[in-house]
Image (tube, rainbow, N blue to C red):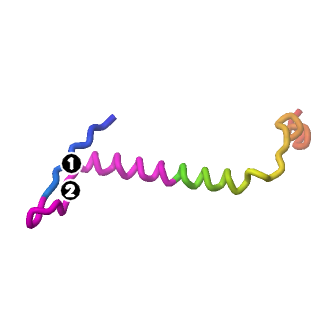
Amino acid sequence: MITIRPKVLEKDGKKEFVILTYEEFLKIQEELEDYEDLKELRKAKLKEASSPTIDLKDAKKELGLE
């Protein structure tokens, strides 16, 4: 696990910029991408929640895998 140690730069007494190491930036970017993927997965599961399902055993039989 990477520890993030941002450096905050101020302009006219107000926080304006954050400086991260490239490694920290990549870690945050990866985490955000994972979060977006999770949101999409949850949305897809919700959309398909009422769709008909088939038992794995029946699916194998239907596909000739048994």
Q: Are marks 2 and 1 in contact (CB under 8 Å)?
A: yes
Residue linked to disc 2: 18
Q: Residues within 10 Å of mark 1 (few under 14, many from 20)?
A: few
Quarter of the view holding residue 54 = top right
Start-end of magenta stretch: 10-36
> Can residue 15 be found in the magenta stretch?
yes
Q: Nearer the viewer, residue 11 or 1?
A: 11
Q: Is residue 31 left or right of residue 13?
A: right
Quarter of the view holding residue 60 = top right
In this view, the residue farthest toward the front is 13
Q: Residues within 10 Å of mark 2 (few under 14, many from 20)?
A: few
Q: Tell me the element at label 1.
A: loop
> Can residue 25 be found in the magenta stretch?
yes
Say what amino acid the circle numbered 1 marks: Pro
Q: Is residue 48 left or right of residue 59?
A: left
How many numbered discs sit on the rendered protein? Answer: 2
Residue linked to disc 1: 6
Q: Residue at x 73, y 54 (%)?
A: 48
Q: Is residue 11 above or below residue 6?
A: below
Residue 8 coordinates in the image, percent (x, y) = 16, 54
Q: Is residue 49 left or right of residue 10?
A: right
Say what amino acid the circle numbered 2 marks: Val
Compute the Cα span from label 2 to label 1: 6 Å
Q: Is residue 58 above or below residue 49?
A: above
Q: Nearer the viewer, residue 16 or 35?
A: 16
Q: Tell me the element at label 2.
A: strand
Residue 22 coordinates in the image, percent (x, y) = 25, 50
